[in-house]
Amino acid sequence: MQLTEERTRPARTRSEGGDPGVGDDPPGPRRSSWPGPGQCVPQRLAARPAGLVHVIAEAKAGCSLCFEYLYRQLAGQVASYLRWHRASDPDGLTNDVFAQVHRSFDRFQGDEAGFRSWLFTIAHHRMIDDRRRSSRQPPTRGDAGVEESLGWGDVEEDAFADMSGDQVRDLLAVLSPDQRDVVLLRIVADLSVEEVAELLHKREGAIKALQHRALASLRRHLDRTAAAAG
Amino acid sequence: MAWIELTTVDADDILAGQPLPGRADLGAVVEIAAFLRASGVGEPAPPMSTGLLRQIAGWSGS
């Protein structure tokens, strides 16, 4: 589904100002003390030792508040993954990814790690579809604009004061498509070697080799750049 | 293709943005990884589209 409608409501609406769950009756099973006064259902669930697994279960069972919470927790990473891949509309595609998650939730079985892996599998396929569509269209100016969309706080900006999104984007362009996939899935999506191997339909050894070569390529390129700079 | 001496654990550490002791030669690569990781963690969720909001609101459960 290609979403073209105006996005009218910020994703954080319910979480800002506290108490998004109070007064709402989640469509899932009623619990006499749930939510308690002043408590947000998804945040309370997420605070349990198992993390998001309870939120995922409730979202799958039909809790829209939990689904929104999942979106707020994970959509930024999905958008970042798509942006580094130079997707044409990372924010719109992120919405498409979650729309597909919502439609297909019945088919999902697993824990939080499994959900993340499933989520990024969908995102990866959306990215490939987008790339195919883009390759059939005439090139437009620039690309997805990683730089302009990095919504970081001051701490991160200070920590990476000597680095820009454009520089990192140029470095990623040094990598082969396979290497880039692996690096972004390992780092931005925070998936394990095993999960990346399953997602890309490759053996774990192949993923390790790809990430090793990617790191070597990056180092070589950085060394050359430093040498050229004198 | 240049090769570098790295164990799988070393590679994991680099991808996690953690410097390797005694491997200053990989410091810049570690910085890149840390930058990418921070970009993913730090990026706010984009606004939900009206289509997605409508879809969620119409959820009937499984």
Image: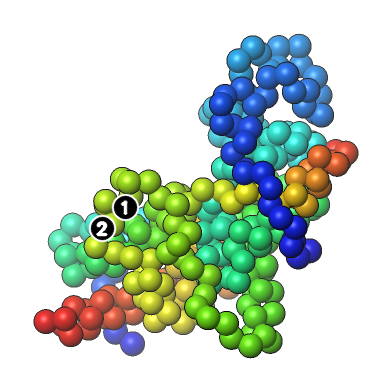
Q: Residue at x 66, y 60 (%)?
A: A92
- Examine the rendered structure and indicate whether residue A55 appears above or below residue B4: above
The answer to whether any part of residue A105 appears in the image is no
Which chain is disc 1 placed on? A
Q: How many marks?
A: 2
Which of A135 and A214 lies nearest the eye of the viewer? A135
In the image, residue A110 lies at what x, y percent? 68, 46
Q: Amino acid at mark 1?
A: Glu
Rendered residue at 34%/72% (across/down): A167
> What's the amino acid at mark 2?
Ala
Q: Which mark is residue A177?
A: none
Q: Chain of mark 2?
A: A
Q: What residue sits 67% from the left and 67% below the top?
A: A126
Tell whether A225 sits left or right of A57: left
Task: Using the image, tell me which numbered label, if any, was put on residue A157.
Answer: 1
CA–CA distance in space, label 2 to label 1:
6 Å
Estimate how packed mark 1 is, as few (under 14), some (14 to 19) or many (20 or more) residues with alpha carbons within 10 Å: some
Location of residue A158 in the rendering, given as x and y in whole percent from the top left corner: 26, 51
Question: Does residue A145 lie above or below A217 as drawn?
Answer: above
Quarter-of-image position of residue A69: top right
- Whole-percent x, y for residue A172 in the image: 41, 75
Q: Which residue is mark 2?
A: A161
Please state, as top left, top right, bottom left or bottom right, where the C terminus of chain A lies in the image: bottom left
Look at the image and tell me in which quarter the N terminus of chain A lies. Answer: bottom right
Do the residues bearing badges 2 and 1 touch, measured as CB atoms within 8 Å? yes
Tell me the element at label 1: helix
Position above or below: A26 against B1: above
Which residue is more in the foreground, A7 or A210? A7
B26 left or right, relative to A205? left
